[in-house]
Image (tube, rainbow, N blue to C red):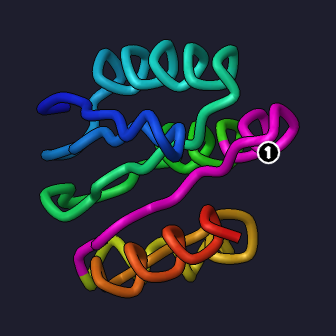
Amino acid sequence: MTGASMNSRNQIVVFKLEGDLPVPQLLDLKAKISQAVERKQSVVLDLEKVRILNSNAVGLLVNSSQKLKAAGGRLYLLAPSPDVYEMMTLVGLEEQVHIYRDRKQFADEVTEKKEK
């Protein structure tokens, strides 16, 4: 994980992930998402540099999405590679999490929703 930025107006925290998402990185991400749940924030995971999603990562995404939603937030997955996107669709992740393949679409839709 390369870091986080936060848009306080929209209460969105962004994490840029990269690599294969080993267990230590997933545990760190889980802790950071738990903080966002407590703060009733939404989370954006920038997946542009992620090469693969293993079962641990998929489980974390599903669980995090449910917890964020219960707290009034959302989980957004941004810019997955074609291989990662295919994996997400194979396991039905797009039915549980907001996935945006295009940054402009994400910015337009999320900004539009927050302004209403």
Q: Is residue 74 magenta?
A: yes
Give left or right: position of 54 versus 60.
left
Q: Dividing the image into 4 quarters, which one contains the C terminus?
A: bottom right
Q: Which residue is mark 1?
A: 69
Provide residue 108's location: percent of width, then percent of height: 43, 82
Provide residue 42's location: percent of width, then percent of height: 58, 42
Q: Amino acid at mark 1?
A: Lys
Give left or right: position of 27 versus 38.
left
Find residue 7 and report its image quarter: top left
**Compared with residue 88, is residue 56 higher up or lower down, i.e. above or below?**
above
Q: Secondary structure at mark 1?
A: helix
* Residue at 62% from the left image edge and 62% from the top image edge: 114
Q: Which residues are magenta?
A: 65-81
Q: Is residue 14 magenta?
A: no
* Residue at 37% from the left image edge and 15% from the top image edge: 28
**Front position in the image: 11 or 84:** 11
**Compared with residue 15, is residue 50 higher up or lower down, i.e. above or below?**
below
**Front position in the image: 68 or 28:** 68
Find residue 101 and report its image quarter: bottom left
Q: Dividing the image into 4 quarters, which one contains the N terminus?
A: top left
Provide residue 83's location: percent of width, then percent of height: 28, 79
**Compared with residue 82, is residue 4 higher up or lower down, i.e. above or below?**
above
